[in-house]
Amino acid sequence: MARAVDNAVELDGALADPHVDGAVLDVRMPPSFTDEGLRAAIAVRERRPGFPVMVLSQYVEQLYARELLASGEGAVGYLLKDRVSDVRQFVDGVRRVLGGGTVLDPEVVAAVMARRRDEPLDRLTAREKEVLSLMAEGRSNASIGAALFVTEKAVAKHINSIFAKLDLPVDLEVNRRVQAVLAYLRL
């Protein structure tokens, strides 16, 4: 039995129903019309791994698309609305997703792959990643130095290198240390 909802609150209720065996979701839903549908898709797949979800969107949201595809379990689709013009192809895509397959718009694949190829964190050395990891724990330069058995001056050099490799220029309005940690946490 098909069920239609038009807002995120009803969607959460519908997806909690154990008899629901798949979902076709719009990324933007009331109340905020931002990313409620995509967040609901990710959440339901966390609660019910492999739950079949077809997401429709006006644009490619790289971070969420990567997260949606991260499990590698299949049963997921991400199509751009302006390219879904053939009803038969769309229905076939939904059937493939319900059957455990994956259906992705070529622009989604290109966007996700482009982001992976040009990931600034990939520019960091192993030691710089260790320093950044300890920065993410909220440690001071002295604490990082002690943990890695290096001087505070060496830690400062690693941090400056991290800032340069992550393209974080000196800006009095922005804390580069926080920006570097945020980049690390988006992994």
Image: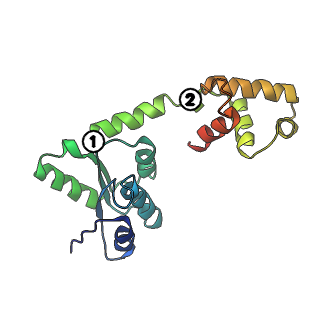
**Picture residue at 73% right of the left edge, 31% below the top:** 127
Q: In the displayed image of the protein, which residue is found farthest to the front?
A: 173
Q: Residue 150's mark?
A: none
Tell whether 183 sits left or right of 140.
left
In this rendering, the answer to whether 14 lies above or below 38 is: below
Image-quadrant location for residue 105: top left
In this rendering, the answer to whether 146 lies above or below 71 is: above
- Mark 2, Cα crowd under 10 Å, few <14 / some 14-19 / many 20+, is some
Q: Position of residue 114 (x, y in %)?
A: 41, 31
**Picture residue at 27% right of the left edge, 61% below the top:** 98
- Mark 1, Cα crowd under 10 Å, few <14 / some 14-19 / many 20+, is some
Give SS at disc 2.
helix
Q: Position of residue 2 (x, y in %)?
A: 21, 71
Q: Identify the mark nearer the N-term, 2 or 1.
A: 1
Q: In front: 108, or 98?
A: 108
Q: Quadrant of the N terminus?
A: bottom left
Quick check: can you spot residue 99? no
Give SS at disc 1.
loop
Image-quadrant location for residue 166: top right
- Do the numbered discs 2 and 1 sit on residues whose CB atoms are within 8 Å? no
Image coloring type: rainbow
Residue position for label 1: 105
Amino acid on which disc 1 is placed = Asp
Residue position for label 2: 120
Q: Position of residue 26 (x, y in %)?
A: 30, 55
